[in-house]
Image: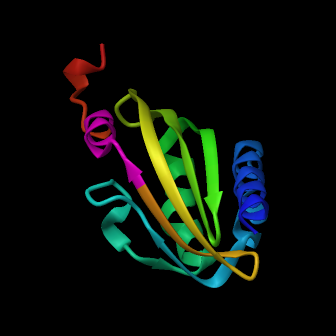
């Protein structure tokens, strides 16, 4: 089961990189509970319940607010109903031209082959700084 979940997570990241958001959402349970890291810019509506809430509250905001944004997993581990991904976010925030290269950890919980719970951990200070850069610092 754990290798299947690792493969599911890997496929999800690959779909996200291709811009295939429907494929990403298809891997989620209809009642998924999604939590962005505390103090992260998209944690304002935690927990997001259901794929539609995640689409509107996280994915669409990323797509509209970042000129480039990538989620690059470097390692994915699995045990039982849990998969954990370690990687990096990279991107440029449109409004400030602030850039990030921030590490992340994503914890996925599965039931019946679908993600039922997600928890993000990341460098929230780096993202906050990129989003709030002053015009003078844009250089």
The percent coordinates of residue 91 (x first, y second) are 50, 33
Q: Is residue 128 magenta?
A: yes
Residue furthest to the bottom in view is 31
The percent coordinates of residue 93 (x first, y second) are 42, 36
> In this rendering, would 114 be left or right of 66?
right
- 14 or 68: nearer the viewer: 14
> In this rendering, would 114 be left or right of 127?
right
User: Could you tell me which quadrant the C terminus lies in?
Assistant: top left
Query: What predominant SS class does the magenta segment belong to?
Result: helix
121 is higher (above) or lower (below) than 55: above
The percent coordinates of residue 67 (x first, y second) are 54, 35
Give the residue at x 55% y 70%.
54
Q: Which residues are magenta?
A: 121-130
> In this rendering, would 75 be left or right of 86?
right
* Quarter holding residue 35: bottom left
118 is higher (above) or lower (below) than 19: below
Give the residue at x 72% y 63%.
5
């Amino acid at each position: 089961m754990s290798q299947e979940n690792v493969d599911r997570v890997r496929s999800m990241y690959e779909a996200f990189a291709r811009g295939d958001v429907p494929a990403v959402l298809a891997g989620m349970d209809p009642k998924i509970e999604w939590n962005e890291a505390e103090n992260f810019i998209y944690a304002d509506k935690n927990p997001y319940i259901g794929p539609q809430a995640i689409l509107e509250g996280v994915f669409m905001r990323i797509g509209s607010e970042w000129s480039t944004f990538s989620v690059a997993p470097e390692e994915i581990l699995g045990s039982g109903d849990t998969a954990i991904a370690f990687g990096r976010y990279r991107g440029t925030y449109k409004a400030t031209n602030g850039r990030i290269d921030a590490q992340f950890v994503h914890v996925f919980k599965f039931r019946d082959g679908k993600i039922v719970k997600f928890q993000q951990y990341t460098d929230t200070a780096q993202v906050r700084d990129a989003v709030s850069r002053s015009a003078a610092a844009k250089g």
